[in-house]
Image (cartoon, rainbow, N blue to C red):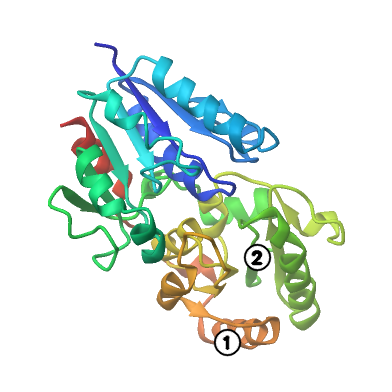
Amino acid sequence: MTNTWLIYALGGGWGHLNRALALGRIAAKDREVRIITNSPYALKINHEGCIVNWISEQAGFSATCQQVQEMILNTQYDRLIIDTFPRGLGGELADILPQLQPIPRILIHRDISPEYVTAKNLRSFVAQNCDKVIVPGEGQDLPLADLPNVQHTAPWLIRNAEELPDRMSVRSHILKVNPDIKTILVCAAGNASELSFFTQITLRLQQNFPQYAVRILAANCPADIPEPLWISHHPGIECLVAADVVVGGAGYNTVYECAAVGVPLVAFAFKRLYDRQAKRANKVYRVQNIQQAITTVSTLLDRIELAKNLSVPSYINGAVQALHYISA
């Protein structure tokens, strides 16, 4: 039997790929790890010791489904790990999962729309086709969290606490800000179509807080952003640790990474087809519009001390916990 894990991580943003890399980089120390993804960001980042099988987002629905099926059916592996979508993002796994017995199939159950669970009869499908289910830090109030084969972990993070760079070196060498002034970091980690919205926020923050440093973390430099304000760095958690306040969406990575490093997050709950950002936004400072975001940032900046005075973050990385559960 080959010592290989295959991780299915389709989805157009950062979340699925980042979770796959968070687990894969740890697992890759003792085995080969292959990740199937169609994230447009996959070619721009370090693959963390994993082999990434990238499907272009331009491939189209049918071609993407076909490529996924071919990879899963023609690759030798002894664990199949499926992020979020047990039937596949396009339903492409529904027919082939039963063919994979006795290979263990593990579902990573991030929060997902209950309507989708009901419409696709996922409770029955998961019970029949997934040997284990792992909830990566999303709590008990999830549609499938009460299944008998569920294991809960802390949130999955792409860096352990002891791996994070020093805050001051991040400020100096990555963010390129004065270590003695407070820093607002806009995390533009959502869909590419939301980049213009984050651009507006960044420019408004710069206008309203000229005494502070404002930066935008994004894969590509927004058209209207002066280049000195733009940061392109992965993994983003290495930048979040050096911020005083973060402004972003309420996606999985942004919420749990900010919580792990102890930085307040001012978040917009963006609409997603399957993810419930509005529910996750209850954990942070949720705002509805740019003016609310500016007011909330102002309140937080008045309340908090400069990040350089804060202690080194300490947290449990759920990806390490999950490694042992999947290996068993």
Quote the CA–CA distance across marks 2 and 1.
Answer: 18 Å
Task: Give the quarter of the figure containing the C terminus.
Answer: top left
Residue at (21, 41) in percent of width and height: 128
Disc 2 target residue:
186
Q: Quick one: label 2 or label 1, which is nearer the N terminus?
A: 2
Foreground residue among 299 and 294: 294
Residue 170: % across, % down:
59, 52
Instruction: Report crowding for label 1: few under 14, some 14 to 19, many 20 or more residues within 10 A (C-alpha).
Output: few
Residues marked 2 and 1 touching at CB (< 8 Å): no
Q: Secondary structure at mark 1?
A: helix
Around disc 2, counting alpha carbons within 10 Å, would you say few (fewer than 14), some (14 to 19), or many (20 or more)? many
Q: Residue at x 25, y 58 (%)?
A: 144
- Residue 219 in the figure: left or right of residue 134: right
Considering depth in this image, is 32 or 206 the residue closer to the camera? Answer: 32
Q: Amino acid at mark 2?
A: Val
* Image spot of residue 131 (x, y percent): 19, 37
User: In which quadrant will I find the N terminus?
Assistant: top left
Amino acid on which the number 1 mark rests in the picture = Asp
Residue at the image point whose x is 48% and y is 56% from the top = 253
Q: Secondary structure at mark 2?
A: strand
Which percent across, then down, holds residue 23?
37, 38
Give the residue at mark 1.
302
Q: Is residue 68 above or below residue 109?
A: above
* Vertical relation: 205 (above or below) 80: below
